[in-house]
Amino acid sequence: MNSLKEKMQEWYVQGKYILTPKGDYSITSSYNALMGGQDKMENASLIWSKFAQPKHRLIAWLATKKRMLTKERLGQMRITVTDMACCLCDDQAIETSQHLFGNCPWIQGIRRSLLQWTDTQLHAGEPKLVFDSIRRKHWQKLKKEVMAAIWGATIYHIWTAKNKKLFQNGNVQVDTIVTQIKKEIKERISMIKLSNRGSMSRGFIQRLLCN
């Protein structure tokens, strides 16, 4: 509480609120100051594309903003966690965002299968870093959107598999997740009428639909 008061005192100089040009108090400015600011999300259009299911978009967005309640984050929030290790693998690594979505040995089979399916290469890493990588690729926009949807679906299914193992002591097979992601992406592609801009990525789309 004292640290919060000290932080709020920094917003005033000689009794004047300094977070707005005119010195008028702003709830939004105060919130952004507390949360460390709201950086521009350059990957927003990829995460929220029409090729991604709404539930995938939400989880991918939260993961990119590092708002997922991993065991590491729960510990940082001073919530008691009896076992900080990742429950999906045997590495005894702390469940961080980097580990869960990038380094965990259990998810590597998912990544390999999906990269083989799409005939692409992407570096492993935290959600934001992978979306950054997709955005910087010299691909057509449609291909970027589909690849981002696949990555968003992957984040979602890793998270649900983790929760099922942690809270229900249930195991989800890698092949089951890969099959489900392919099914979901194919359904989204089939639902959407591709415009002329999709013609340059037609070979890529056909590959996904036929495999």
Image (tube, rainbow, N blue to C red):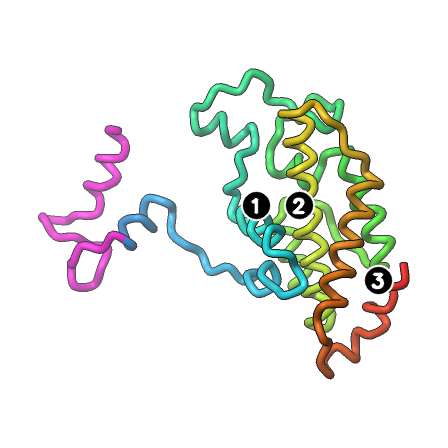
Q: Residue at x 80, y 46 (%)?
A: 178
Residue in the foreground of this view, choosing between 175 and 191: 191
- Magenta stretch holds residue 22: yes
Side of 43 relative to 182 (left or right)? left
Which portion, as a residue range, is magenta?
Answer: 1-27
User: Which residue bears the numbered disc 2?
Assistant: 155
Q: Are marks 2 and 1 in contact (CB under 8 Å)?
A: yes
Q: 10 Å neighbourhood of mark 1: few (<14), some, or many (≥20)?
A: many
Q: Which mark, by number, is residue 208?
A: 3
Instruction: State whether residue 73 appears in this view.
Output: yes
Amino acid type of the residue that numbered disc 2 sits on in the rendered structure: Ile
User: Which residue bears the numbered disc 1?
Assistant: 63
Amino acid type of the residue that numbered disc 3 sits on in the rendered structure: Leu
x and y, in percent, of residue 111 in the image: 79, 46
The picture quadrant where one finds residue 24 is bottom left
Instruction: State whether residue 138 appears in this view.
Output: no
Say which element carries label 1.
Answer: helix
Q: Residue at x 71, y 80 (%)?
A: 195
Spatial CA span between label 2 and label 1: 8 Å
Q: Is residue 134 above or below residue 34?
A: below
Instruction: Tell which circle, 2 or 1, labels the residue nearer the N-terminal end.
Output: 1
Spatial CA span between label 3 and label 2: 19 Å
- Check the picture and name the quadrant holding the N terminus: top left
Instruction: Tell which circle, 3 or 2, labels the residue nearer the N-terminal end.
Output: 2
